[in-house]
Amino acid sequence: MPWKYGFKSIKAIVKIELLKRPPITSWNSFAPNEYGFYANVNPDVAHPRWSQNSERQLGSTFFTPRRQTELFNGYGEQVASLYSEMNLRHFF
């Protein structure tokens, strides 16, 4: 699965359609200030209600120390060029 196609991790891609404007989704309809288009690619930009600069790995316990969240969720080498001219604080 590609690295970023949704907050809840999609199960399958049926098609990809390129649009001039971001589509209306349930996330940006119900909480437009919380989940912008670039919302989980830049850990230096905090979510309105919490920080994104640290995380616990899936499968870890509550007592496992948090680790620093990596830019582009650790896929920077593969995807950073896709965002090279974009302001990752805009449309958060």
Image: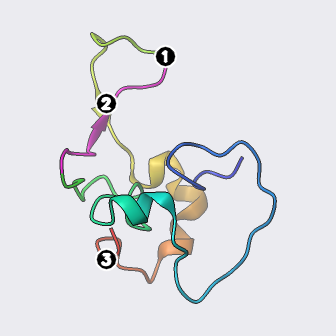
| Sequence-first disc among 3 and 1 | 1
Give the percent coordinates (x, y) of residue 91.
35, 74
Real-space Cα separation, disc 3 to disc 1, in angstroms: 32 Å
| Sequence-first disc among 3 and 2 | 2
Residue mark closest to the camera, 3 vs 2: 3
| Sequence-first disc among 2 and 1 | 1
- Amino acid type of the residue that numbered disc 3 sits on in the rendered structure: His
Real-space Cα separation, disc 3 to disc 2, in angstroms: 25 Å
Dominant SS of magenta comes to loop
Asked if residue 22 is among those painted magenta in the image, a careful observer would answer no
Q: What kind of element bears circle 1? A: loop
Q: In the rendered view, would you say 92 is above or below 22?
A: above
Q: What residue span does the magenta drawing correspond to?
A: 49-58
State the residue at coordinates (46%, 55%). 72
Read off the residue under disc 3. 90
Q: Which mark is residue 67?
A: 2
